[in-house]
Image: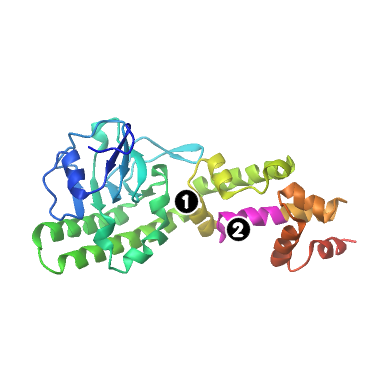
Amino acid sequence: MKSSKPDIYTISSISQLMRELGQPEPLHPLIGLIDYSRVQPVNIEMGKKICLDLYKISFKTSFRGQVKYGKGHYDFEEGGLAFIKPLQIVFSPDDIQSYEGYALFFHPDFIRGYAINHSIDNYGFFSYATSEALFLSHKEKVIISNLFATIAVELENNIDAFRQSIIVSHIEQLLNYSNRFYNRQFITRKSVNNEIVTSLDNLLNSYFNDNKGLKKGLPSVQHVCEQLGVSMRYLSDMLRTVTGMNTQQYVQHKMIEYSKDLLSATSLSVAEIAYRLGFEHPQSFSKLFKSRINQSPLAYRQSFN
């Protein structure tokens, strides 16, 4: 197998993937569906880094043990979905038994020429970490199982001019259902989400109270996600569902609320407040404040006098 680095396997085609897993030749050169209850991979070295130049949708009928969300761990037994987009680096499992359920792989060229090729980046879960998998209810698992079964039937039994278009439509349907189910997960797993939001609030409060903005500048989305241990896209999508704001908007909201306290209760100048928050130019702070509050910082301060 070719590798871009000595310790990274690069898999760039469905045929190569099937060879590496010790599977028969694919039924279609650009898409492959593996049912791990029927076959077990035999060639992949455990624990190795893999650069997969393919889309992958993993459907496990059960998750056992602990799953990490942010800094915490939570026990799950139900099944779910995980998504990988091309050129992500992943690790092969250390245990062969980890290969369970189904895995759908398709090359980017399989959807090229279809509408989904232009919209697939809108499905943010392809950028989530594996620990941020989608956990399914029994009814949801039935829907997903049926879609995987339908794709399998199309691959095995229908070799005609309509096969690719029909499979692409089923993939799009699978992604749309996943969007719906993720939205449900953000709402129903309130304890997990509340813990993440509370940790984010504490992180931002500490950042502002300790005047870290003077040295580090404005708190970035990347910084808060690294501190919380969640992926940027997952946090943004979760916050949008829970609060109506993405991560950047939420950070700015907390920043404005903190600045309102300083304007109303201290004698710090607008420039001093701007620098403490991390702005390089006070004018940028004033512009953001006015866009959110509909008042300039000075006008807001004067309303308390």
Asked which secondary structure carries label 1, the reply is helix
Q: Is residue 157 left or right of residue 41?
A: left
Residue 249 has which mark?
2
> What residue lies at 18% left-to-right and 60% top-to-bottom?
150
Residue nearest the observer in this picture, 118 or 97: 118
Point out residue 294 in the picture as x, y percentages from the top left corner.
74, 69
Start and end of the magenta stretch?
243-256
Point out residue 287 in the picture as x, y percentages from the top left corner.
72, 63
Residue 234 has which mark?
1
Numbered label tally: 2
Dot 2 surroundings within 10 Å: few (below 14), some, or many (20 or more)? some
Point out residue 18 in the picture as x, y percentages from the top left corner.
17, 44
- Label 1 is placed on what type of residue? Tyr
- Label 2 is placed on what type of residue? Gln
Give above or below for 1 relative to 152. above
Is residue 248 rendered magenta in the image? yes
Is residue 219 rendered magenta in the image? no
